[in-house]
Image (cartoon, helix red, strand yellow):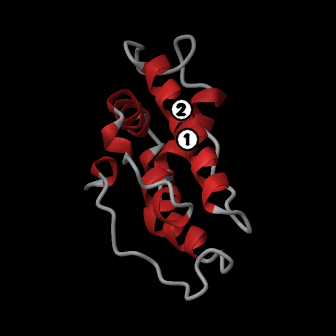
């Protein structure tokens, strides 16, 4: 899934990049539909962790800051289920700090000059 780079571009460029991001996300969901808990083989692997780190940041970081807010991760059933499955792997949940993720993305002054960190979103996979 590509992150939109809209810095210094126009509405048409943004909408074209956005359409590509939506296609990539939908394609990822299609690939995971009907799959088991992980991408390949019988064990959690590097590909799983790379996809997971992208998806776990989806709503908290990318949606607002990169103007990718058409859908939330919850709107992609297979991707949402995948994140839930991976985060339940022993030792994974402890590595996820949504507040840290939000603060990191919101510190990009070119995109967020006032440094305001949103209160939300409430994410089901990080609920206590």
21 to 94, vertically: above or below: above
Residue corresponding to mark 2: 23
The x, y position of residue 100, in whole percent, is: 52, 68
Residue 92, placed above or below residue 59: above
At x 27%, y 49%, the residue is 124
Q: Circle 1 sits on which residue?
A: 19
Q: Nearer the viewer, residue 104 or 114?
A: 114
Question: Quick one: 119 or 25, which is closer to the camera?
Answer: 25
Q: Residue at x 37, y 27 (%)?
A: 78
Q: Label 2: how many residues lie within 10 Å, few (<14), some (14-19) or many (20+)?
A: some
Residue with the most extreme front position: 12
Q: Position of residue 125 (x, y in %)?
A: 32, 47
- Number of numbered discs overlaid on the protein picture: 2
Which quarter of the rendered picture does the C terminus lie within?
A: bottom left
Quarter of the picture holding the N terminus: top right
Are dots 2 and 1 in contact, CB under 8 Å?
A: yes
**Percent coordinates x, y for residue 12 in the rendering:** 63, 54
Task: Report, in whole angstroms, how far the alpha carbon at label 2 lies from the one at label 1.
Answer: 6 Å
Rendered image quadrant of residue 86: top left
Dot 2 falls on a residue whose secondary structure is: helix
- Residue 19 occupies which quadrant of the picture? top right
Q: Is residue 76 left or right of residue 68?
A: left
Tag 1, which secondary structure?
Answer: helix
For the residue pair 46 and 28, the one nearer the viewer reads as 28
- Say left or right for 59 vs 8: left
């Amino acid at each position: 899934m590509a992150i939109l780079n809209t810095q210094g571009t126009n509405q048409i460029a943004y909408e074209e990049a956005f359409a590509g991001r939506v296609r990539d996300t939908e394609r990822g969901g299609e690939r995971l539909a009907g799959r088991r808990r992980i991408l390949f083989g019988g064990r959690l692997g590097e590909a799983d962790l790379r996809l997971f780190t992208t998806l776990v940041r989806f709503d908290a970081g990318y949606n607002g800051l990169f103007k990718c807010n058409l859908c939330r991760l919850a709107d992609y059933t297979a991707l949402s289920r995948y994140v839930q499955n991976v985060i339940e792997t022993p030792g994974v949940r402890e590595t996820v700090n949504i507040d840290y993720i939000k603060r990191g993305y919101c510190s990009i002054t070119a995109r967020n000059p006032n440094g305001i960190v949103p209160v939300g979103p409430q994410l089901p996979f990080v609920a206590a």
